[in-house]
Amino acid sequence: MTTNIDLAARRSAAVPRGVGSSTAIYADRAENAELWDVEGRRFVDFAGGIAVLNVGHRHPAVMAAVRAQLNRFTHTAFQVAPYESYVALAERLNAIAPFTGPAKTILFTTGAEATENAVKIARAATRRPAVIAFAGGFHGRTLLASAMTGKVMPYKRGFGPFPGDIHHIPFPIPGKGIDTADSLRGLDMLFAADVDPMQVAAIIIEPIQGEGGFNPAPPDLLRALRERCDKHGILLIADEVQTGFARTGRMFGIEHGGVEPDLICIAKSMAGGFPLSGVIGRAAVMDAVDPGGLGGTYGGSPVACAAALAVLDVIEQEGLAERAAVMGGTIRDRIEAAARRNGNVAVANLRGHGAMIGFDIVDPDTDAPDGDGAKAVCARALEAGLILLSCGTQGETIRILVPLTVSDAVLDEGLTALDTALMRDAPAAPKEGVGSEAAPA
């Protein structure tokens, strides 16, 4: 039998150390919110492939759509021989875009492609170069996306110089004493000292910061950004790569803020595990780019488009936005109870919308962020049969991204494992029935 240790040794010899993994388990198969490793151990998945699996692993409707497409063709390149599924998906995304007026959509492959192309579109539409992003934001790992990302380690060290005319301002984080007024002062100071607002093409913001710590953008910040964008002719880009497709209890996270963006970056859960991304935008803005200026060989893969059309059906038919809100309440209740329990690690700053929930592990005496403590929680969770991720500028945040299709029983099982992981002296061995079951045939 192949073991995790065997594969780790092979990986060390074959794969560069620059790509890290949160766990040392190697996946063999998965179903909905459960995953089995190559040694046959079963885990509840609270990571969802980093927000990719809102409809779960191998949803039957997605798999059926993919199989049907595989029997027809796998690739033509949309720029060579276009196909209906790309057009049909664009039509459906345009119809649900969270802004008034006509919309258009272009499809790519990765989240970084989406954010970079949103900037290209914004620059073409405004004829301006500058972009404003936020400290702690994450917009991808390619060079321009890394420049927009507001975190040096591990995303920027050793990779410069970065593209110019990218500027950062503070993001409101109440737990760290930063509020909307601080962000707006930073923006006004930026306009006064470093960049003329008439040279700014776009402001890009995550409705809830992902890698930066699951920090929701306050509605008053979003309203103020919209006002300043309108005043200066700047486009507002909502990076919905992690927040999109019902995760927050709405189709798009920006809908919690009550403002309309001009461009929306989408990826991750759009295609149920298949690589697909895109930009939805106001039609007049999207049409600012000349033919040939946008595209990509694999952009809008026909297999991924088929999957994405099925994902949209599942979200609607299974009421996953509403399901996210209900699940979020259950998750919050359990974490709040754990935070009150004697003998647990110190938990603070529970936050999020819908089923996109984060909380911090902090020093019990000083309330300082405890990244090592969060790492230890994730390690104990894995021992208890739960795949769990951390994030945050100091690695202090535990983030929950369980598939929205999870059964109540499996959700409860995962939350029970989380309870165990939050104990200071959690047992080292997996509990019976979790992390030890054979994989399904």
Image (cartoon, rainbow, N blue to C red):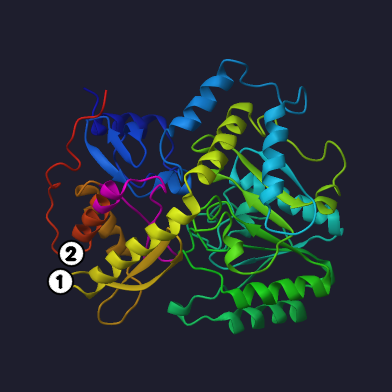
Question: In this view of the protein, which residue sits in the foreground, 220 or 76?
Answer: 220
Residue carrying label 2: 423
Secondary structure state at the residue bearing disc 2? loop
Write the residue at 15% across / 71% down: 343
In the image, what residue type sits under mark 2?
Answer: Met
Relative height, residue 189 to residue 171 (above, below): below
CB of mark 1 within 8 Å of CB of mark 2? yes
Q: Position of residue 203 (x, y in %)?
A: 70, 65
Give left or right: position of 13 versus 243. left
In the image, what residue type sits under mark 1?
Answer: Gly
Q: Position of residue 217 (x, y in %)?
A: 56, 70
Relative height, residue 377 to residue 300 (above, below): below
Tell me which corner region of the image, top left, top right, bottom left or bottom right, holds residue 369.
bottom left
Give left or right: position of 96 versus 123. left
Residue 409 among magenta residues: yes
Write the residue at 43% across / 53% down: 323
Residue 29 among magenta residues: no
Write the residue at 46% across / 49% down: 51
Extent of the magenta region: 386-412
Q: Position of residue 378 (x, y in %)?
A: 28, 55
- Which residue ends up furthest to the top in the rendered image? 71
Nearest to N terminus: mark 1 or mark 2: 1
Residue density around tag 2, few if under 14, some if 14–19, many if 20 or more, within 10 Å: some
Tell me which corner region of the image, top left, top right, bottom left or bottom right, holds residue 12.
top left
Question: In this view of the protein, which residue sits in the foreground, 164 or 116?
Answer: 116
Relative height, residue 421 to residue 402 (above, below): below
Residue 395 appears in the picture as rendered: no
Residue carrying label 1: 343
Q: Position of residue 178 (x, y in %)?
A: 52, 80
